[in-house]
Amino acid sequence: LQSPLELMRLLGSVMSHYQQLLALRKAHKFSLFIHRRDLCIFSLCVACGLRRAELRRIQIADVDFEGSTIRVAGKGSGRFTIRERLAFFSHPFLQQVLHRYWKMREALPGSSFFCNWVGDPMTGRSIEAIFMTYTSFLRPPAPCNPTVLRKAFCTHLVQRKLNIAAIQALMGHEKCETTLQYYVQ
């Protein structure tokens, strides 16, 4: 998934899935919440290059709607974070996706930004399952997970000739060499 068209197809697969549930009358009262959450997860992976573990660690207090930023706890054990960075969601589409999800999320208990329909935090497996569900709707099928979208995010930054130090900061890498080795080819 490299081209903007492929990424748009991926985001569209979330809506297609929801429309299919409605058409088959299989949608339940939490379907809209689940689809908004999933679209939000996909959108943040595409637009900010977030890792799966970073998505899981986002807390409600980390999201600043006024500043259009999310404080992202980078790599670490969960108790100790090696470094933090800011992810920006200034694009109107991403702002709308986050706001729509938040309107439903704020009624649930818990402090994790991404949660299930009862307010429990997302697990790594549940995020993997989300990606498997929606990528099955893509024709032709395309492998997709947060790592693939993270690489696409970095590739788009390189193609736009963004300074490598800026890319390193946006990716949350400690060393510029990491960015060059794994993402710039």
Image: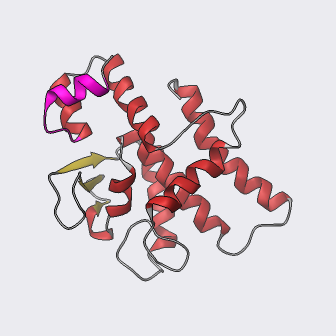
Horizontal placement of 25 versus 95: left or right?
Answer: right
Residue at (13, 33) in percent of width and height: 175
Verify whether residue 170 appears in magenta: no
Residue at x-position 20% and y-position 32%: 168
Q: Is residue 70 above or below residue 49?
A: below
Residue 123: image quadrant is bottom left
Query: Residue 23, position in %: x, y?
Result: 84, 58
Range of residues picked out in magenta? 172-183
Say whether residue 132 is left or right of residue 110. Answer: right
178 falls in the magenta region = yes
Q: Is residue 122 left or right of residue 62?
A: right
In the image shown, does 17 or 175 lie closer to the viewer? 175
Q: Residue at x 60, y 39 (%)?
A: 10
The quadrant the C terminus occupies is top left
Q: How many marks do you count on the picture?
A: 0
Q: Position of residue 145 (x, y in %)?
A: 50, 43
- Residue furthest bottom as drawn: 109
State how the image is colored: secondary structure
- Looking at the image, which is closer to me, 108 or 52? 52
- The answer to whether residue 168 is above or below residue 17 is above
Task: Determine the residue located farthest toward the right in the rendered image.
Answer: 24
Along the horizontal axis of the image, is 23 left or right of 174? right
Decide: is 61 above or below 83. Answer: below
Q: Quadrant of residue 67?
A: bottom left
The x and y percentages for residue 75 are 23, 51
The residue drawn where x is 27% and y is 69% is 61
